[in-house]
Image: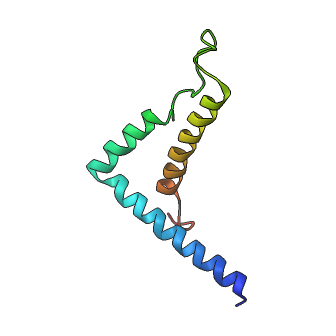
Amino acid sequence: MIEADKTKAENERKNIELARCFKRMAKTDDGKKIMKDLEWMCCHKRTSIGPANDPERWNTNQCFYHEGMRNVYLYILGKINRKENEND
């Protein structure tokens, strides 16, 4: 096995283990509360763009900031929902 293949396999192993950690956390009562809070805080189910009638309150940087928060939540959710193989 060449070095690049070894590195890729090691990274995949680490990603699988990290996904398992997120899944274990999400199954606990505390994890469920944390995910619910992050869902709200990170604008997962609502727009992160401010109201059109209040342009002074929202600017491009704020939108980028809120989309960044949303991206972190989606990253965590992706790890929780990650399938390790076809049988999951």
Point 46% across, 55% down: residue: 80
Left or right? Give the position of 56 relative to 16: right
> In terms of depth relative to the viewer, which is nearer, 46 or 53?
53
Seen as rendered, the residue at the extreme top is 53
- Above or below residue 35? Residue 49 is above
Total labels: the figure holds 0
User: Would you place residue 24 above or below residue 46 in this image?
Assistant: below
Left or right: where does residue 27 sit relative to residue 60? Answer: left
Q: Is residue 74 left or right of residue 61?
A: left
Using the image as rendered, state which of residue 83 and residue 70 is in the foreground. 70
| 1 is higher (above) or lower (below) than 77 | below
Residue at (59% x, 72% y) in the render = 12
Displayed quadrant of residue 15 = bottom right
Residue at far left of view: 29
Position of residue 41 measured from the top left corner of the image (x, y, whole percent): 44, 34
* Percent position of residue 48, x then y: 57, 28
Determine the residue positioned at 58% across, 41% down: 68
Question: In the rendered view, does 24 fall on the left or right side of 15?
Answer: left
Q: Residue at x 60, y 29 (%)?
A: 62
Q: Quadrant of the N terminus?
A: bottom right
- Residue 9 lies, in percent from the top left, at 62, 79
Residue 28: x, y in percent? 29, 53
Q: How is the image coloured?
A: rainbow
